[in-house]
Image: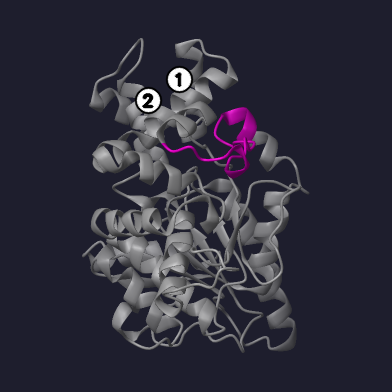
Amino acid sequence: MAKNGIKARDAANILRTTDFGGWSLCIGAGASLPLFPTWQGLVQDLLITGPSPLTANEAKKLRDSFPPEALISATQEMLGLDDAGYRRHLTEKLYKTIQNEAGKLWPIVAKCLMARVPGNALASEWEIFLQFAASANPSSFALADVLLESVEKNKAPNAVLSFNAEPLLFALLNANAVARFRKRRSSPSGEESETGPGVVDRIEGSTSWAKKGRLPYYFCHGFLPLSDSVTRAVSGTPPAALFDSKMVFSEVDYLDLVNTVWSWQSSVFTRAAMSDRIVFIGLSLTDPNMRRWLAWIHSQRLHEIQSRNPTVMQSTQHVWISITSGAKAIDKWTEALVSHLGIRLVWLDDWGEVGSTLRKMLNLATV
């Protein structure tokens, strides 16, 4: 039997670092709504626009029949674009909503989204970006706040693993770090930057890494940046802030990743799944490759536990923070669907609870 899910109000202190080597955060596109689409939402937009647009119902039928990566490959074929042209097309779709929501603030928002380190934007620009995000996406704003507090309280995750193609939470971590630095040092000395030191490093491939003492933020499916020309036009962001990373969005890219045992994505994820408690937020947990990794690791772990104690029938290592369906039967089935992956549910009644729930799980002071 799968373990019962935990209500958010009962989630206090479940990320005990004494149980494992620490914890890691696995963030999905659902955490960036409504400023950025989920993968399914992006595919829906691609299918209902373009040279041979489908109706919303027709597009849904295709989405119910084929995985997102197959449909993304098909849309590239229908548009007749090469890889570079299609990346530009995807970028326009991906950033469309946040650009519209930002309006006149878009030059500053774009600059902060593309910044690698706090010094790539002014303190005043980070403040504007933080205020915009707090209003437009309060859940990601709250997550960034909790993560920065966990860094300060020596309870930080070992890594953040992102399966998004956009940097909203990463940018919010930079923005929050600047705000905290400015609160402590309202008048930085002449030798200090007005934005303070970096606390998080963006990692998009096997040749990039996190500096000692910084939180590594892995873009496991790649990162779609605004083009250099667009970014320069709106914000003057230096080229060093951009990285043309290898995207994993087409079916060929995805199958290549699946069949490459020693890919850097596989190494990063399996290390976290073996040694850490992973907290999943904003993911559907339907990705077959992720499920394959988790199932294999959990099976090995349970086998080793049972070799020492044959009476143990179940064990969960990881946590999935998700919204309850409101139907007990559906929630029960959902718990069973991830139990053999070593995952237990923490149920929220509302997405606005995600920051306070993670705070409880880390036993941080209530604010």
Q: Between 260 and 292, which is closer to the camera in this rendering?
A: 260
User: Which segment did they paint magenta?
Assistant: 235-254
Ranked by sequence position, the earlier of labels 2 and 1 is 2
Whether residue 132 is visible here, answered yes or no, is yes
Residue 102 image point, x, y percent: 27, 42
Residue at 61% in and 36% down: 254
Which image quarter is the C terminus in?
bottom left
Q: Is residue 74 above or below residue 51?
A: below
**Position of residue 290 measured from the top left corner of the image (x, y, whole percent):** 58, 52
Q: Is 16 positioned to the left or the right of 257 in the image?
A: left
Residue 359 located within the stretch drawn in magenta = no
At 62% from the left and 88% from the top, the residue drawn is 311
Residue ID for mark 2? 46
Please name the residue that numbered disc 1 is placed on: 75
Helix, strand or loop: magenta stretch: loop
**SS of the residue at dot 1?**
helix
Crowding at mark 2 (Cα within 10 Å: few <14, some 14-19, many 20+): many
Question: CB under 8 Å between callouts 2 and 1?
Answer: yes
> Residue, x 57% and y 40% (percent of image)?
238
Check if residue 246 falls in the magenta segment.
yes
Position of residue 187 measured from the top left corner of the image (x, y, whole percent): 44, 74
